[in-house]
């Protein structure tokens, strides 16, 4: 998907009539300058009601260990600030399974160590607190909502420094075709603007800005 950015995908979604596919809030990446693009592997955390002290991480372990190459892990928390939901060791395990990155509307911890791994982990904020005894992974592989956008398993997700975009699987072929054409057109427009063309000229010629 060379040349795709969240902005190009957002414009493509607008073109096909899907105008509410960008998360309302920008998620910050632990590794600056990172762009991730993959298929959503979804999970949802909720406040912990009963804690099994012998098996506090079993659900998350099973979820991450079963990740596949190309997965982009999506963790919905209801924008919880109760704890962190992702850290260095989860990142290392995800890298080992071939996951391309992770987004969450909750918190990270070990931000500097995640950055050292080069893993694309995007989150609302950071907090050092472990989720054990505070939150629990309640469900996986079902639709979740983050930033007012519904994300279903298998949807394409891109996150970069501009924001996070979700392409529903049902519209994937159409959106990617439009995005491919737009990426090519933007390259031409860029060259002409740098060479001295006016914005008015390129807009009237290509209808791209």
Image (spheres, rainbow, N blue to C red):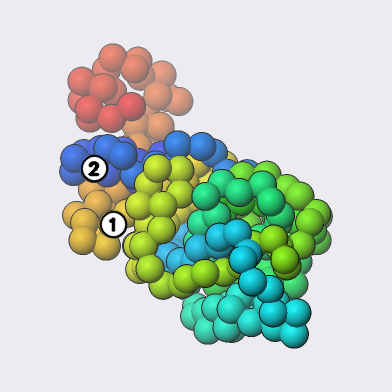
Rendered-image quadrant of the N terminus: bottom left
Using the image as rendered, state which of residue 47 and residue 126 is in the foreground. 47
Is residue 53 among what the camera can see?
A: yes
Query: Rounded to the nearest whole Å, what is the CA distance between mark 2 and mark 1?
Result: 9 Å
Q: Is 174 or 83 nearer to us in this picture? A: 83
Q: CB atoms at circles 2 and 1 under 8 Å apart?
A: yes
* Image disc number at residue 13: none
Check disc 2 and report the residue beneath it.
18
**Picture coordinates of residue 189 (x, y %)?**
34, 31
Along the line of sight, the residue nearer the viewer: 198 or 174: 174
Q: Which residue has dot 1 on it?
A: 168
- Rendered position, 165 above or below 100: above
Q: Quadrant of residue 52?
A: bottom right
Q: Is residue 90 above or below residue 112?
A: below
Q: Residues within 10 Å of mark 1 (few under 14, many from 20)?
A: many
Viewer-proximal residue, 64 or 4? 64
């Amino acid at each position: 998907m060379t040349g795709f950015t969240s902005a190009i995908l957002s414009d493509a979604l607008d073109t096909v009539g899907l105008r509410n596919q960008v998360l309302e809030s920008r998620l910050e990446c632990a590794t600056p300058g990172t762009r991730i693009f993959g298929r959503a592997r979804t999970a949802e955390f909720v406040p912990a009601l009963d804690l099994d002290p012998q098996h506090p991480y079993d659900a998350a372990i099973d979820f991450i260990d079963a990740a596949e190459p190309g997965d982009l892990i999506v963790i919905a928390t209801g924008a919880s600030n109760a704890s962190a939901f992702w850290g260095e060791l989860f990142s290392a395990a995800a890298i080992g399974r071939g996951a391309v990155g992770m987004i969450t509307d909750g918190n990270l911890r070990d931000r500097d160590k995640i950055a050292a791994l080069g893993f694309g982990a995007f989150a609302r904020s950071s907090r050092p607190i472990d989720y054990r005894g505070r939150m629990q992974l309640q469900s996986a592989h079902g639709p979740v909502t983050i930033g007012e956008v519904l994300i279903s398993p298998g949807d394409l997700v891109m996150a970069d420094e501009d924001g996070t975009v979700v392409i529903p699987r049902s519209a994937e072929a159409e959106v990617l075709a439009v995005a491919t054409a737009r990426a090519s057109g933007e390259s031409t427009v860029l060259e002409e603007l740098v060479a001295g063309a006016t914005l008015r000229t390129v807009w009237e010629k290509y209808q791209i800005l």
